[in-house]
């Protein structure tokens, strides 16, 4: 199983990767630039080569990148929308240079629209433009969100709508966040709830579109639609769901990454806990 964490920047991207390897990650998520700024430095070709070499030698693939939190590709104002689309294209471009095959994005919110569906249509058009203008080696993953504010993709149907609009383009997939789906109303706490949630995911989206999992417990209750990550087993979801997850044969090849608090020290504890839940 590929288990790891979103590692905070350790300087260069190769150093960040090494810090993940040092704590025993076999999956990794990074930022390729500051997640709270629009401006990003161009990728230094030497830094990209160094990162690629280490990623290949370590066997830790696929590495995942998370895009900037500022990006909303269905922004109502055309100028702002284009800035967001260009920002995501630039992120995909940096990933192509680093050899990072997966980019996770929250994609956007429906603020300013009459309906969620109207915004989802604009979102799908934005994704089409992004995929058309970026390197074929990079796949974009829409993340399941908590549905905080007017965020879209808090229902599996939203992501299914995008997949359908993109005619199942293989360069668009899904990243499921356990904390987000739980607060959005998909329960995981009991065996029955865990099975029902994954059955719904498979029926509505399709397991084959799942390319990454964010593994987080939740500080906030079921259906609260508030996004606050908690250490594994210390939150409202509880340990049982995570024990199921790390022993679920369907996810043997899917990178599972922690985005829990107190990185990187907290990641060591949570990662060791996840590993201890694995049954031989
Ligand atoms: Zn997440
Ligand atoms: Zn979150």
Image: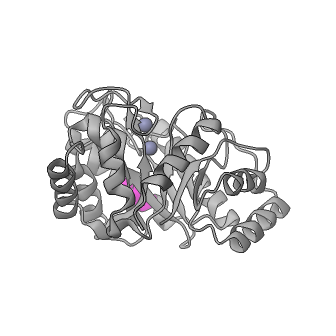
Task: State the quadrant of the C terminus.
Answer: bottom left
What's the residue at 64%, 56% (across, down)?
24
What's the residue at 47%, 51% (across, down)?
274
Does the segment drawn in magenta span residue 38?
Answer: no
Left/right of residue 184 with respect to residue 107 in the rendered view: left
What's the residue at 70%, 73% (across, down)?
56
Q: Looking at the picture, how far across and down is residue 143, in whole percent?
A: 39, 49
- Main SS, magenta region, reads helix
Q: Looking at the picture, how far across and down is residue 213, in whole percent?
A: 41, 54
Q: How many marks?
A: 0
Quarter residue 199 falls in? bottom left
Q: Looking at the picture, how far across and down is residue 176, in whole percent?
A: 36, 52
Left/right of residue 32 with respect to residue 119 in the rendered view: right
Question: Which is more toward the observer, 210 or 33?
Answer: 210
Q: Give the answer, above or below, for where 64 lies relative to 9.
A: below
Q: Give the answer, above or below, for where 119 lies relative to 224.
A: below
Q: Over which residues does the magenta segment extend?
A: 124-129
Q: Is residue 119 visible?
A: yes
Quarter residue 221 falls in? top left
Q: Give the answer, above or below, for where 153 lies relative to 45.
A: above
What's the residue at 79%, 44% (across, down)?
11
Quarter residue 17 falls in? bottom right
Q: Give the answer, above or below, for where 188 lies relative to 111.
A: below
């Amino acid at each position: 199983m590929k288990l790891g964490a979103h590692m905070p920047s350790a300087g260069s991207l190769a150093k960040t990767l090494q810090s993940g390897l040092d704590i025993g990650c076999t999956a990794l998520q990074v930022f390729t630039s500051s997640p709270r700024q629009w401006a990003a430095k161009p990728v230094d070709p030497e830094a990209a080569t160094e990162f690629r070499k280490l990623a290949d030698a370590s066997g830790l693939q696929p590495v995942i990148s998370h895009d900037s939190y500022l990006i909303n590709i269905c922004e109502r104002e055309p100028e702002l929308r284009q800035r967001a689309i260009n920002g995501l294209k630039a992120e995909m471009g940096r990933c192509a240079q680093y050899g990072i095959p997966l980019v996770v994005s929250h994609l956007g919110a429906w603020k300013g629209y009459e309906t969620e569906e109207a915004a989802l249509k604009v979102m799908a058009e934005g994704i089409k433009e992004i995929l058309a203008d970026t390197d074929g080696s990079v796949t974009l993953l829409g993340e399941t969100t908590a549905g905080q504010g007017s965020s879209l993709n808090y229902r599996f149907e939203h992501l299914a709508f995008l997949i359908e609009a993109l005619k199942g383009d293989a360069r668009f997939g899904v990243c499921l966040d356990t904390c987000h789906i739980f607060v959005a109303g998909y329960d995981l706490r009991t065996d029955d709830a865990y099975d029902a949630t994954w059955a719904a995911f498979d029926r509505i989206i399709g397991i084959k579109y799942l390319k990454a999992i964010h593994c987080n417990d939740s500080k906030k209750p079921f259906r609260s639609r508030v996004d606050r990550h908690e250490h594994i087993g210390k939150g409202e979801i509880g340990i049982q769901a995570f024990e199921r997850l790390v022993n679920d044969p369907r996810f043997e090849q899917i990178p599972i990454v922690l985005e829990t608090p107190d990185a990187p020290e907290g990641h060591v504890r949570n990662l060791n806990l996840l590993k201890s839940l694995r049954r031989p």
